[in-house]
Image (cartoon, rainbow, N blue to C red):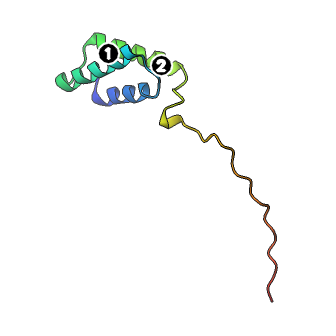
Amino acid sequence: MNKERLDWVMSGLNQHALTKAEDQFLKIALEDFDKNNALTERQEERLESLYKLKSQSTPNKKSDHFTFKKSSPKKTEPRRPRTKAF
């Protein structure tokens, strides 16, 4: 797995709520990649399967990327036609 793919998977996983074990695994995988510039085959498989599993569920609504404004838009006054000034 290359650095770009790892960054892509990590950004996708960060949009979801993770368990403590999953979060710990991601931290260890990142540390291993930084040290060795590679992951073990088992780590890659687990990372890919975790990504596939989480990408099928809906993202965490508390994530900044998916926050929506909860208030309704303010009502505006209807536009009045301009009167001609002489």
Look at mark 2 in the image and give the residue it sits on: 54
Query: In what quadrant of the picture does the C terminus appear?
Result: bottom right
Q: Give residue 34's quadrant in the image.
A: top left
Q: Are marks 2 and 1 in contact (CB under 8 Å)?
A: no
Residue density around tag 2, few if under 14, some if 14–19, many if 20 or more, within 10 Å: some
Q: Name the side, left or right, on which 1 lies relative to 12.
A: left
Q: Residue at x 23, y 23 (%)?
A: 31
Instruction: Measure how far apart labels 2 and 1 are at the Cα level.
Output: 15 Å
Q: Residue at x 81, y 71 (%)?
A: 81
Element under disc 1: helix
Mark 1 belongs to which amino acid?
A: Glu
Q: Give residue 3's quadrant in the image.
A: top left
- Residue 53: x and y, percent? 47, 15
Q: Give residue 71's quadrant in the image.
A: top right
Q: Residue at x 17, y 22 (%)?
A: 36
Q: Nearer the viewer, residue 6 or 61?
A: 61
Look at mark 1 in the image and give the residue it sits on: 44
Q: Nearer the viewer, residue 71 or 1?
A: 71
Q: Earlier in the sequence, mark 2 or mark 1?
A: 1
- Residue 28: x and y, percent? 27, 19
Q: Residue at x 36, y 20 (%)?
A: 23
Q: Nearer the viewer, residue 33 or 16?
A: 16
Please tell me how many numbered marks the rendered image carries: 2
Q: Is residue 41 above or below residue 76?
A: above
Q: Name the side, left or right, on which 50 lies relative to 61.
A: left
Q: Is residue 46 above or below residue 68?
A: above
